[in-house]
Image: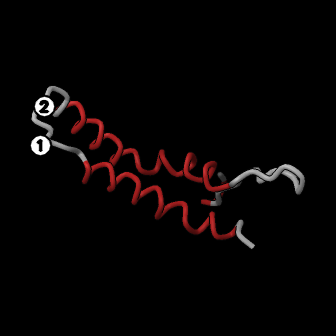
Amino acid sequence: MGGGQIQVDIGDVDDPVDPKLQIEDLCKPKCEAFLKAYEACAERIEGDETGEKHCTGQYFDFWSCVDHCAVGPTMKHTS
């Protein structure tokens, strides 16, 4: 990943690979703070038996970060 570019292997014509999954994996480290917040929340509510506590906000914050990072490189691979 030199120079901020995300490089992925999209396979060949006969056996293409969806680059989005690879790009998301490469973006996840950039969103580590959001992942840690989600994991901390999940640990805090682990014993909740009421079902009222949740970590939906932290979950969506993490995936929003990943999506924001991945959108440009993903669109470069669409035709």
Q: Which dot marks residue 19?
A: none
Across and down, in percent, residue 68 comes to 46, 64
Q: Which residue ends up furthest to the bottom in the rendered image?
A: 79
- Seen in the picture, residue 24 relative to 3 is either above or below; the reply is above
64 sits to left or right of 37: right
- Seen in the picture, residue 27 relative to 49 is either above or below; the reply is below
Return the residue nearer the eye: 60 or 30.
Answer: 60
Task: Give me the residue at 54% from left, 60% from top.
Answer: 70
Task: Give me the residue at 24% from left, 35% from top.
Answer: 42
Residue where numbered disc 2 is placed: 48
Residue where numbered disc 1 is placed: 52
Mark 1, secondary structure of its residue: loop
Circle 2 crowding by C-alpha within 10 Å: few under 14, some 14–19, many from 20? few
What count of labels does the image hold? Answer: 2
Q: What's under tag 2, amino acid-wise?
A: Asp
Q: Which residue ends up furthest to the top in the rendered image?
A: 47
Mark 2, secondary structure of its residue: loop
Across and down, in percent, residue 43 comes to 22, 30
Across and down, in percent, residue 76 comes to 68, 69
- Seen in the picture, residue 48 relative to 72 is either above or below; the reply is above
**Displayed quadrant of residue 79:** bottom right
Task: Give me the residue at 15% from left, 26% from top.
Answer: 47
Circle 1 crowding by C-alpha within 10 Å: few under 14, some 14–19, many from 20? few
The answer to whether marks 2 and 1 mark residues whose Cβ atoms lie closer than 8 Å is: yes
Return the residue nearer the eye: 41 or 56.
Answer: 56
10 sits to left or right of 28: right
Q: What's under tag 1, amino acid-wise?
A: Glu
Colouring convention used in this rendered image of the protein:
secondary structure
**Displayed quadrant of residue 74:** bottom right
Across and down, in percent, residue 36 comes to 32, 40
Task: Give me the residue at 71% from left, 66% from top.
Answer: 77
- Seen in the picture, residue 70 relative to 8 is either above or below; the reply is below
